[in-house]
Image (cartoon, rainbow, N blue to C red):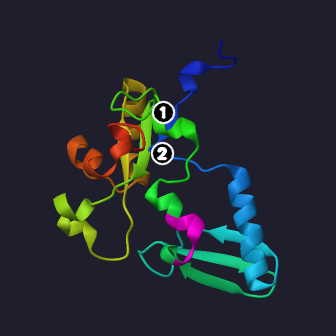
Amino acid sequence: ELSGNPEHLITVDLICHGVPSCAMLRDYLKLLGKRFRTKVKAVCFRDKSVSRDFTARIETDRKNFRLKSSLMSYYALFLKGEIYRSSCYSCPYACPDRVSDITIGDYWGIGEHHPELASGEKHWSCVLVNSAKGQQWLEHCKGELELFPSELTWISSRNHQLNHPSL
């Protein structure tokens, strides 16, 4: 049972591609610390300030590093979907029938269907409305967001977890 005022609750889910274990990430960060001979303070796996590619920013006690995903075993294996938790490969939420009011995620391949939006420095996200409450919320927020209509089939063609779990 929900406490409080559920009519003010907006549920949001993410298009999730999978999640490795926390222990695996901790071990990898220790390995990076040994490699750089300093303590790793923070990692940003998708540092968009440098490029649109999958480049990570690693902050240490001494200096910051930027590495492409192909040079980082953890990151490369994550992107290939090879190190997710076992439950990710049978996730019941990775399907077209979403349980939230709103679904958000990356709009991969936007240039295929909206070439006018693909150029420049912007990175686009998708917002999928799954309920009347979600539609009300989106209407309320329209002035704060840069929105354009698209097609679910276009979005799901590159966000496979809208169709099925990670393979």
Q: Amino acid at mark 2?
A: Cys
On screen, residue 126 above or below 51? above
Please tell me how crowded label 2 is: few (under 14), some (14-19), or many (20+) other residues with Cα within 10 Å: some
Q: Quadrant of the N terminus?
A: top right
Q: Residue at x 37, y 76 (%)?
A: 121
Magenta region: 71-76
Nearer to the camera, 16 or 166: 166
- The quadrant of the rendering that contains the C terminus is top left
Above or below residue 81? Residue 6 is above
Question: Along the horizontal axis of the image, is 121 left or right of 84?
Answer: left
Residue 94: x, y in percent?
42, 35
Query: Is residue 113 a member of the stretch shown in magenta?
Result: no
Front position among marks 2 and 1: 1
What residue would you read off at disc 1?
Answer: 91
Q: Position of residue 113 (x, y in %)?
A: 17, 58
Residue closer to the observer: 65 or 4: 65
Name the amino acid, label 1.
Cys
Question: Is any part of residue 107 visible from this angle?
Answer: yes
Q: In the shown orientation, is residue 87 left or right of residue 28?
A: left
Q: Is residue 131 left or right of residue 10?
A: left
**Do labels 2 and 1 touch, CB within 8 Å?**
yes
Farthest residue in the bottom direction? 63
Mark drawn on residue 16: 2
Q: Is residue 140 visible?
A: no
Taking the spot 64% from the left edge, 84% from the top edge, the residue there is 65
